[in-house]
Amino acid sequence: MGELSTQRLLLRHWRESDLDPWAEMNADPQVREFFPNLETREKSTAAVARFQAGLEERGWGWWAVEVAATGEFIGFTGLNPISANMPFTGVETGWRLRRTAWGHGYATEAARACLAYGFDVLALPEIVAFTAAGNVRSEAVMRRIGMTRDLNGDFDHPNIPDGPVRRHILYRIAAPAS
């Protein structure tokens, strides 16, 4: 599995040319508002290496997102196995976009493609998403793609130190009935 496409987007493997805009995005305080810190270029580069390794190993994972009409890199989205130290299991979907890509419906469009792939190709029974409490933009995307908040699923993220973004909320969506 190499790529997914939507009406306006291409979800694809990472390229060397993605590294600069990815690092810039991860150094943007508004993009990283609901993360404990900004990311250095080194950490951003290491993340891309992990993302690409996941794509090569499984055929799916965290894809780079580009606007099909222009070829502009705008962020990432995808599906990823839940880390073993989390208080739940399964596969998550997620997204992060450059500020210039906000407000165009790209996150929703990309996330819907990921859900379709997860359910139709991977035959997943459920997909989850989570975000720091207060991240209303991500919550709105979760609701738009049909996810429902698990009111019993709030948790303190084990990889985030104590502070204002440690508390997370959990959303879920089950595979459509066949």
Image: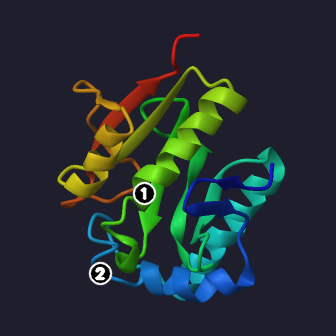
Q: Is residue 170 left or right of residue 26?
A: left
Q: Note whether 165 is above or below 15 in the view shown.
A: above
Which residue appears at 37% of the width and 80% of the height?
100
Which residue appears at 71% of the width and 47% of the height?
60
Which residue appears at 61% of the width and 69% of the height?
68
Q: Decide if residue 83 is in sight here.
A: no
Place of residue 97 in the rendered image (x, y in percent of width and height, measured from the top left): 43, 69
Place of residue 28 in the rendered image (x, y in percent of width and height, measured from the top left): 35, 83
Mark 1 or 2: the one toward you: 1
Q: In which quarter of the view is residue 53 placed?
A: bottom right
Q: Which residue is mark 2?
A: 29
Local secondary structure at mark 1: helix
Q: In which quarter of the view is residue 72 placed?
A: bottom right
- Return the disc, 1 or 2, that comes first in the chain's sequence: 2
Place of residue 50 in the rendered image (x, y in percent of width and height, measured from the top left): 69, 63
- At label 1, the amino acid type is Ala
Query: Dot 2: few (<14), some (14–19), or many (≥20) neighbours within 10 Å?
Result: few
Q: Name the quadrant of the C terminus.
A: top right
Q: Which residue is mark 1?
A: 107
Asked if the residues shown at circle 1 and circle 2 are in contact, with their CB atoms under 8 angstroms apart, the answer is no
Residue at mark 1 to residue at mark 2: CA–CA distance: 19 Å
Q: In which quarter of the view is residue 170 placed?
A: top left
Q: Note whether 114 is above or below 55 in the view shown.
A: above
Q: Which mark is residue 61?
A: none
- At label 2, the amino acid type is Pro
Place of residue 149 in the rendered image (x, y in percent of width and height, measured from the top left): 27, 31
Q: Nearer the viewer, residue 36 or 135?
A: 135
